[in-house]
Image (cartoon, rainbow, N blue to C red):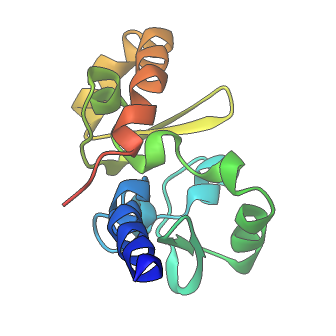
Amino acid sequence: MQRRSILLAMTAILAPLPALAQAINTAGGAAIQGFDPVAYFTRGAPTRGNPAITTQWRGAEWRFASEANRAAFLAEPERYAPAFGGFCAYAVSEGYTASIDPRAWRIVDGRLYLNYSVGIQRTWEQDIPGRISRGNGNWERLSQAPRG
């Protein structure tokens, strides 16, 4: 009986964890709405990933324009994955999450930041160091928040 009580308690504790651990924006069915994270660095432009060239990382599907880009990501996923799980950098700096437009992007100090729109990006760019700092301060809490 005691063993059953312990198992029930553990199930109750662990059951919510998958929702809480999800810290990657998968709106549109894949990370970065299916755009290739490596291409931002190598091509300097947002590039749609090929649905046949994918990997799973942190519970999300990541798509790539080429096998070489997939290999680069697999070797260093933290280098290529966008900051704040691919959520809007401006929103995270304000204390909430929002989706992104893959064409509203910027690499700062070797890190990819995405924003909701080009207009929001312009606002974010008015204080990049401050926005990144505030985003970093908010991200731990936001990355653990349940998403519906």
Residue depicted at x 27% and y 26%: 95
Q: Nearer the viewer, residue 62 or 21?
A: 21
How many numbered tags mark residues here? Answer: 0
The residue lying at 44 percent from left, 9 percent from top is 130
Residue 2 percent coordinates (x, y): 43, 76
Which residue is painted at 37% across and 48% down in the image? Answer: 103
Name the outermost residue toward the front.
1
Position of residue 127 measured from the top left corner of the image (x, y, whole percent):
41, 9
Q: Nearer the viewer, residue 23 or 71?
A: 23
Is residue 12 depicted above or below 54 in this figure? above
101 horizontally vs 36: left or right? left
Name the residue rendered at 71%, 63% in the picture: 73
User: Where residue 13 sits: x, y (%)?
Assistant: 37, 62
Residue lying farthest to the left in this orientation: 148
- Quarter of the figure that contains the C terminus: bottom left
Q: Depth check: give the residue in front, 110 or 48.
A: 110
The image quadrant of residue 22 is bottom left
Q: Is residue 33 visible to us here?
A: no
Q: Left of 85 or right of it: where is 111?
A: right
Residue farthest to the bottom?
52
Q: Is residue 52 visible?
A: yes
Picture layout, residue 32 above or below residue 140 = below
Q: Quadrant of the N terminus?
A: bottom left
Compared to residue 11, the image places residue 53 above or below, namely below
